[in-house]
Image (cartoon, coloured by chain):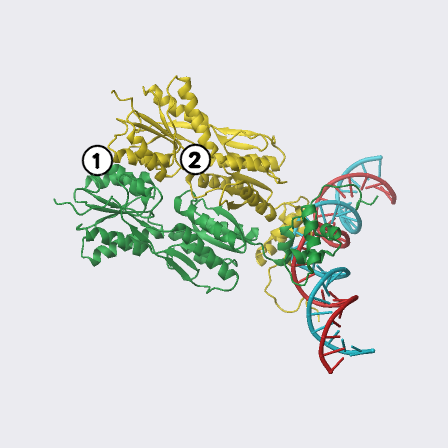
Chain colours: A yellow, B green, C cyan, D red
DNA sequence: GTGGGAGGTGTGAGCGCTAACTTGGCACTA
DNA sequence: TAGTGCCAAGTTAGCGCTCACACCTCCCAC
């Protein structure tokens, strides 16, 4: 009545099956699989042959259970449809793979602290070894800082939180470059189409813009505000086109700049002759806007890679636990910018 | 010398700890956790209180080991930086979460069959219960069809493979709509800026375009070809601008259309007065191109959701294993299209 | 009063693996 | 010859959970 060797049941082979076929103990199979030393070459070959013959796949749950390592990292993203987050995710995934980790993603619906906590908890319940949070909103960042989590965590975005390791872009610097460039061209001042008030990136870019104007002794005009979308840029553009003292606009991202260009075009204000426009991000399409957009390039892929590097470092204990890596953006000159008009 | 109860070691609480604190057996804790019937309300409450007090988290690896269910699905994507794949991924993730699954992603570097096989194997080794492949290239699709995998699998993209369940967009139909609309406006024929030859979506859109022209008895001009990017659209645009019999162009995606618009603008060919342009995808920015782009809308999020639905259905045995779901795209009219010019 | 069927709970085994220890052999030294 | 060491295995004990089953009440029917 032994159910052991009765029948040719179609179940997945396990280590013991490989061991039996190779004429060794299961432990030797394990040794071969994990590249342990002190296995004779011909033994190793027999084991490998058996593995191939049975098409054996180690059971990762069993391994995880005993090693307490899932080889999986979690990524919390906000809106992974946007170019920035999507690129970061891509960079993270590639870096994770080459470091030998899997990547499990979850995106947030809303950006309050509770959602962030839930997302991180969810990933933690799944057994991830560490988490990267792509959440550049102020609320999310402070949520991350408050996070009660025993999981190593890295934030990517902006802000100066000191509690969590972080990788961010020099938004202030980039905004300063853009604004400075416009001032250098003779513009008396530069208007600003900012992003949502609760995004850190918005804040930093706005601050970079403001400080540069102030340092140059230029007037600081009232800020227009959008939600990153081309649509909101268009609407802001209609308002800006109505002002007659505008000669230069710095937009907090390229999509809004696109909408702005559209609105200016419709209003008959020519770019760059009447009004110069600068964006931020350098999405692949920016060079093909009408006119091609001068913008501040940030390397999202690199951002993701750095974040992962930091996390893996922390995980494997070879990293300073409170690093803050900064990526420097770069001004890319195109035709949407010209010297100040003479009025 | 007992290491058992010696010291207050800081290790994660396990089910037994909860059981002891609540004064029940580990099995009862398990019952509460899994919502099994026949647990007295006050017992349940005691267990829940103990769980909260210890901040107990079930170990998913242990559960997976015994249940043989990882609650994880894999997604193989090609270039998740592109708007389409990113949106699908987003749709898949959201749908997966609400169905109670985690999502593990991996992106392909190249699109040959071996890469696809490797990616699927990798996910399978990780223990995913099923896989969604977002890989619309011909090579990838045939690779999927040939895939030696014991994991349930759904493809999203195009093509008529019958071996794997699939969800796709009515590319032929959409291309036909676009082309037909242009012909209806009096254009003698419609030029086509196609995508890469090895993408199924390219092929289908090209075919839809061609068949519509033929059905209308219109001439079928030579196809220009790009790689989906705005840059390639620009280059093709320069070539097209050199032809003088062009009055309408149907582009296989919006990004190439953007590049095309740019090239036409530079060449002094006005859109839509001289040349009408239609895109495909309806990315959020399309409405803000110069001029706003008439295009064929496809709902990527829906695509992802349907794919997941199919996969979960297969997994839980409530689905026809060879379904082929089709999403119908829709022509969105904007200003980049006008009646044929009179020459 | 006794048998039976529920509801409610505990016990033991085992998922497939790795870690730690044990064992056996062989070479090389004292 | 016995002793030391290292290589190349095997043996055993869990990791933390769920499943199958055993068990113990009660309560009700006859």
Image x and y of residue A215, in percent? 42, 18
Judging from the image, mark 1 belongs to the subunit labelled: B
Q: Are the residues flagged by discs 2 and 1 from a single subunit?
A: no
Judging from the image, mark 2 belongs to the subunit labelled: A
Question: Is B134 on the left-hand or right-hand side of B184?
Answer: right
Quadrant of residue A82 within the rendered picture:
top left
Question: Is A180 on the left-hand or right-hand side of B332?
Answer: right
Q: Nearer the viewer, residue B72 or B136?
A: B72
Question: Is B86 on the left-hand or right-hand side of A322?
Answer: left
Q: Which residue is mark 1?
A: B267
Q: Is residue A304 visible?
A: yes
Q: Secondary structure at mark 2?
A: loop
Q: Is residue A42 visible?
A: no
Mark 2 Cα shell of 10 Å, populated few (<14), some (14-19), many (≥20): some
Q: Nearer the viewer, residue B66 or A10?
A: B66
- In the image, which is nearer the foreground, mark 2 or mark 1? 2
Which residue: 67% across, 67% down?
A5
Q: Which residue is mark 2?
A: A196
Give the quarter of the figure containing the N terminus of chain A.
bottom right
């Amino acid at each position: 009545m032994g159910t052991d060797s009765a029948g040719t049941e179609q179940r997945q082979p396990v280590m013991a099956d490989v061991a039996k076929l190779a004429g060794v103990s299961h432990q030797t199979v394990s040794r071969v699989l994990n590249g342990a030393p002190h296995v004779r070459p011909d033994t190793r070959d027999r084991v490998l042959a058996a593995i191939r013959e049975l098409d054996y796949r180690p059971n990762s749950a069993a391994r995880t259970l005993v090693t307490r390592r899932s080889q999986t990292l979690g990524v919390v993203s906000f809106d992974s449809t946007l170019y920035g987050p999507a690129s970061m995710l891509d960079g993270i995934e590639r870096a994770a793979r080459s470091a030998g980790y899997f990547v499990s993603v979850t995106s947030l619906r809303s950006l309050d602290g509770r959602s962030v906590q839930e997302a991180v908890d969810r990933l933690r319940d799944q057994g991830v070894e560490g988490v990267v949070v792509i959440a550049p909103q102020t609320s999310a960042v402070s949520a991350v800082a408050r996070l009660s989590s025993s999981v190593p965590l890295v934030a990517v975005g902006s802000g100066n939180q000191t509690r969590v390791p972080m990788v961010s872009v020099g938004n202030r610097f980039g905004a300063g470059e853009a604004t400075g460039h416009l001032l250098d061209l003779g513009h008396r001042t530069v208007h600003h189409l900012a992003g949502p008030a609760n995004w850190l990136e918005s804040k930093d870019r706005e601050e970079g813009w403001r400080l540069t104007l102030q340092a140059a002794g230029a007037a600081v005009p009232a800020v227009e505000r959008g939600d990153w979308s081309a649509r909101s840029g268009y609407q802001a553009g209609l308002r800006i086109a109505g002002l007659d003292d505008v000669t230069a606009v710095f937009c907090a991202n390229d999509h809004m700049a696109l909408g702005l260009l559209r609105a200016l075009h419709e209003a008959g204000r020519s770019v760059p002759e009447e009004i110069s426009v600068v964006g931020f991000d350098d999405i692949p399409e920016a060079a093909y806007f009408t006119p091609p957009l001068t913008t501040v390039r940030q390397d999202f892929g690199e951002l993701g890679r750095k974040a992962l590097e930091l996390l893996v470092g922390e995980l494997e204990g070879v990293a300073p636990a409170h690093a803050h890596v900064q990526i420097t953006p770069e001004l890319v000159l195109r035709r949407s910018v010209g010297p100040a008009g003479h009025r």
